[in-house]
Amino acid sequence: MIDRIDIKNFKSIALASMPLGHVNVFIGANGSDKLNILEAKMFVKIFLSLTISLFSIGTCSATAYTIKVITFNIGGDFIANGPNQWKNRKPMMMQFLSKEAPDILCVQEALYNQLNDLQMSLQMYEMVGVGRVDGKKKGDFNSIYYRKDKFEQINSGTFCLSEKPDSIGRLGWDAKYPRIATWINLRYVETGDIVFILNTHLDNVGKKARVEGIKLILEKIALLSKSDNILLTGDFNDVEKSKVHALATQWGLVDTYLASPKKKGVEYSFHEFGQKEMKKRYKLDYVFTSKCFEILSVNIPKERLKKGAYISDHNPVIVKMKF
């Protein structure tokens, strides 16, 4: 049985016809020219798909303009959070969003009632997303908000992070919870440039689910994006030295925090409502971009206790960039 395949010839063809980021995921972490048979099947599948759609995929924007992108795990509405219940955090969240006024906002762990509350501060925005349990209103949303005066939607959707991506609500691999990814292709009204955004929340327990989840996400980006202007945001429940992070960057994406010439705030994003030991606070939330973007600054504002509550158990990641 053949379990290895030499792709030296295919590699040169792929590099000549596809954006670099769409190829790296198939080359293997050690830069080898050989793939196992499962990787080869995935390579052929996406290579053919991308070849067919080459003339519809855009390139980096010709005109540079600045946008602000925020990813924020806002923390669910749970009674068990005690003084940090949503009703106590909601005013802080609405004030924060009104002050920051991002062009694109990606949230995780938001329940339907929380989204209704957020809409009061986000009337200039359109939102896409569904609940992770039933594909409608039940369970956490990984919603994407965008300024409707600056962007218009081309298409969007949500898929399940599991062996059956079309089955929202299904547990994938060793995950404790069902996980999803929401995506959208947007057109910048002023120039017509297209940007692709995918927002996710990887499992907090299943290591295999996180690794397989990011692999599926990268495959889907290659298939769904209508532009090389790519944003990948979310709570990845993993650190910079993890395999999840390595897969994203080896694919060609850029960790905006590491790439930014200006950093403000703290170096971690998860603090568990201020309860986590300082030495055990890690950055689990990321904004990745394709190389089309010039990263200007990243701010992870330090958590603040206000009237006995924190705004969330995570800090937001605020990124200013040009593309």
Image (cartoon, grey):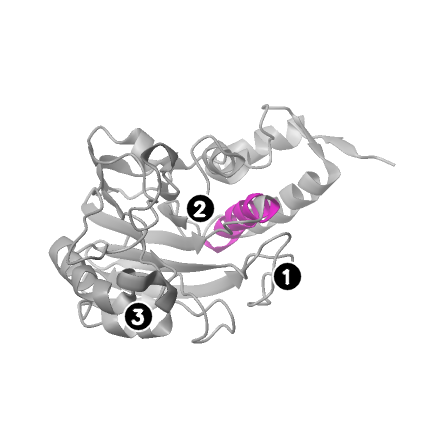
Amino acid at circle 1 = Lys
Residue 34: in magenta span? no
Amino acid at circle 3 = Leu
Left-right relation of 95 to 153:
left
Query: Where residue 36 sits in the image (x, y, percent)?
Result: 72, 35
Instruction: Indicate the quadrant containing the C terminus: top left, top right, bottom left or bottom right.
Output: top left
Q: Nearer the viewer, residue 251 or 8?
A: 251
- The residue singled out by tag 1 in the image is 164
Query: Where residue 113 sits in the image (x, y, percent)?
Result: 32, 74
Q: Residue at x 23, y 56 (%)?
A: 311
- The residue singled out by tag 2 in the image is 236
Left-right relation of 103 to 194:
left
Quick one: label 3 or label 2, which is nearer the N terminus? 3
**Mark 2 Cα within 10 Å, few/some/many (few <14, many 20+)?**
many
Report whether residue 78 is seen: no
Secondary element at image label 2: loop
Quick one: label 2 or label 1, which is nearer the N terminus? 1
Left-right relation of 223 to 164:
left
Residue 213: in magenta span? yes
Q: Answer above or below: position of 37 versus 206.
A: above
Magenta segment boundaries in residue numbering: 208-225
Residue 166, quarter of the rendered image: bottom right
Spatial separation of the CA atoms under disc 2 and disc 1: 20 Å
Amino acid at circle 2 = Phe
- The residue singled out by tag 3 in the image is 115
- Which marked residue is nearer to the observer: mark 3 or mark 1? 3
Instruction: Indicate the quadrant containing the N terminus: top left, top right, bottom left or bottom right.
Output: top right
